[in-house]
Image: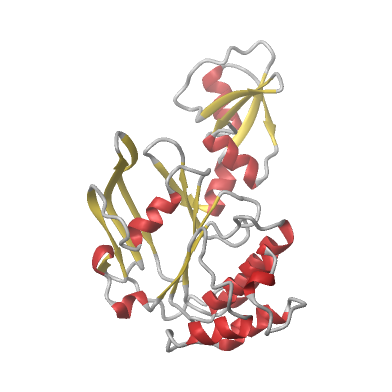
Amino acid sequence: MKNQEHISSSPIIEISNLSHRYGEKKIYENLNLEIEPGTIFGLLGKNGVGKSTLINLLMGYLKPQSGQCRIFGEHANYLTPQTRSRIALLYEGFISYDSMTIAQVEQFFSTFYPRWQKKHFQNLIDLMDVSLTQPLSSLSFGQKSQVILGLLLAQDADLLILDDYSMGLDAGYRRLFVDYLEDYLQGTTKTVLITTHVMSDLENLVDNIAIVDRTTQVYQSSMADFNNRFRCYSPSDDYQMADSHLIHRKEVHRQTPLLYSFESKATLEQALNTSLIEIPMSFEDRFLGFVGKY
């Protein structure tokens, strides 16, 4: 568990009344979100729902139609070099210098970051059966991602923004990424914003979540509260799938009617006047039940 002592009370990230669209398509409308210091925050959603857009807004690469984003108290569109140096960004589709060797790329990046901690880079490289003299072009995608992660962690930043870290990685590299990140954060007050559409990796890592779907509404909760409250039920065979404000989503999966709700079994049975069977779910099941499988 991360060290929570001596953490500033001011949010690291503040998003206030944020609205953004592409043409006629609304992505966010009046979004308000705060990420507290020392928090591991998961921004979750399927591909194409606006996770990377929010990262671009936070980093000042886009200007919202209305509202604002602030990082370390500064407006996202006017971040000072000093504040940017406190942010380590892993961007989807990261750029690497393939002609450089592993040793050269570490030396190159280290010149830009005064707090550089080479040990984090070296520790990750030591986990691979590679030579420091190998060019990045000779590495597999997973190995190259591991080099990029080493470059990111060596920056010793106060805020890590990891945009779709899992893109193109197999289960082994994703597990290494999450395990090493968890060890790296142990005993620190660093803050992490991580976006992904791969749910299973994050359940035991993330403190709080925001789920982005194809509406402009963003659901926010702690990971624990979402897992405890969001449930799936199968009603009796003769139940007609009527609408109810107590039901978040209803679907038929392989001829089995399913109801997803934040309500307890007893409350929902009484409201719907039918018997229900609760269906066990993993975190990934809950996520798909919330946003829809297809």
Q: Position of residue 183 (x, y in %)?
A: 63, 75
Above or below residue 225? Residue 240 is above
Q: Give residue 10's quadrant in the image.
A: bottom left
Image quadrant occupied by the C terminus? top right
Residue drawn at (61%, 50%) of the image: 199
Which residue sits furthest right? 129
Q: Position of residue 282 (x, y in %)?
A: 67, 45
Residue drawn at (58%, 75%) of the image: 99
Residue drawn at (70%, 63%) of the image: 173
In-image side of 100 versus 140 (left or right): left
Image quadrant occupied by the N terminus? bottom right
Q: Is residue 165 visible?
A: yes
Q: Position of residue 192 (x, y in %)?
A: 48, 67
- Which residue occupies the foreground of this view, 26 or 249? 26
Above or below residue 180? Residue 291 is above
Q: Is residue 40 visible?
A: no
Residue drawn at (57%, 85%) of the image: 104
Q: How is the image coloured?
A: secondary structure
- Which residue occupies the foreground of this view, 186 or 235? 186
In-image side of 64 versus 178 (left or right): left
- Which residue occupies the foreground of this view, 101 or 257? 101
So how many labels did they put on this image? 0
Q: Position of residue 193 (x, y in %)?
A: 47, 62
